[in-house]
Amino acid sequence: MANSVKDLMDFYKDVEREVYLDIENSAPVASDVLEEMLPYFTTRAYGNPGVTHKLGWEAYETVMDAAETIAKYIGASTAEEINFTPGDTEANNLALLGVALASRRDKGKVVISEIEHLSIINIVPLLKRMGFEVVKIPVDGEGFIDLDALSDAVDKDTILVSINMANHEIGTIEPLKEAVEIVRDRNPDAYIHSDASDAYGRIPIDVSSLGIDLMTLSSYKILGPRGVGALYVREGVRIERIIEGQVGTQRLWPGIENTPLIVGFRKASDLMFKDFEKLRGYLGSLRDRLIKGILDSVDDTILNGPQGDKRAPDNINISFLRSEGEALTIELSLYGVYASSGSACTRRMLTPSHVMTAIGREYEAAHGSILMKVTRLHTMDDIDYVLEVLPKAVERIRSITPSGGD
């Protein structure tokens, strides 16, 4: 296995420039974030935040400061409403399963959209085994949730509704305000959760004005460290822990808090919100340049998801007809451009992404989709380089694809 990986790496030895756009699957920790984190591994606040000695108090103060910072950026009332988890997958599980476990009803219903992240979609079988009914709400061709279907689905038995704020694959910014109003009208007691992993730091969020009860946040998608995320839980929400262990400062997630990673999450958040509107505009300009450049220079392409302000400013997802997405990502990587075909959890499977099928993409378009995301570290020169090499990569893949030579 080691030799085969070495042989594969030899293909990349002549790559002179690299542009990493595979933020959906993983991301580098920005150097300014890493610099902030390093002292907390060795010399600062390395004690257990739950222990009452000097280094424990330092750690506690650090964790609570990070919680206060993140609470401020989403409009939460208190730091205690921020619960750090090992990542957004764990936060989504805590939200859905924690509310289900806390439900004292003989029956209940959970409502989700068809295009949720797999860390929500894959909870469905477990919820059903627990006795809950699960209803999936369809979306239109751009990924917007069907509000009429949502209204029909929510009833007196509904305990939780989960709708992503910005879709992880196609960037659709959902009409959450309208969705919340529908849910509140149909059942004021139902809780509302939103996975905002692809919205936090990229679009404005105010949980109070939205009326959201629970919200998932991600660190690595804003160039913070992997291994840490957060779940906002409004005070008064009935929710239980889904794992047990030593209870620290985080009531809903037991264990010793990973202070260095939490510090990195805080720093990454600060950098995203430092000049928020300017950064949003910059990301949007990178996104639009790449989308327009691809659609103008490569024929038989389809933009997946909406355009403009209804799309997350960092998201680019385009289907290249007569091309296989996985083959195209490999070809692009030989030029030093790294992207993904479909979502992180489905890219090695033969079945198309559930998001692509939900928006009505045919098999060819679904399998030919390429997902790219830009960050504050990318430049216009990076985008121009992608636009220079991508048409060459597409041409080559089409030339060796049985249906691509026509």
Image (cartoon, grey):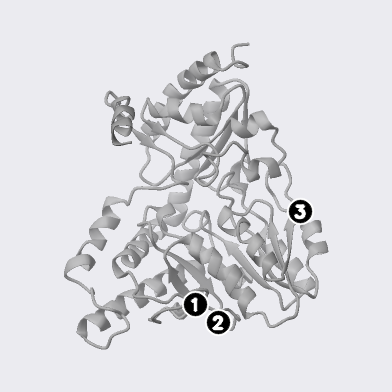
User: Disc 1 marks which amino acid?
Assistant: Glu
Which mark sits nearer the N-terminus, 2 or 1?
Answer: 1
Packing grade of label 1 (10 A; few <14, some 14-19, many >=20) is many
Residue 321 location, x and y as percent? 62, 24
Locate residue 96 relative to residue 3 in the image: left or right.
Answer: right
Which of these two is toward me, 25 or 64? 25
Which mark sits nearer the N-terminus, 2 or 3?
Answer: 3
Q: Residue at x 68, y 60 (%)?
A: 112
Q: Is residue 364 above or below residue 32?
A: above
Q: Which residue is mark 3?
A: 146
Mark 3 touching mark 1, by CB under 8 A? no
Quadrant in which the N terminus appears:
top left
Mark 2 touching mark 3, by CB under 8 A? no
Which of these two is toward me, 74 or 360? 360
Q: Residue at x 31, y 70 (%)?
A: 259
Most extreme residue toward the top is: 406
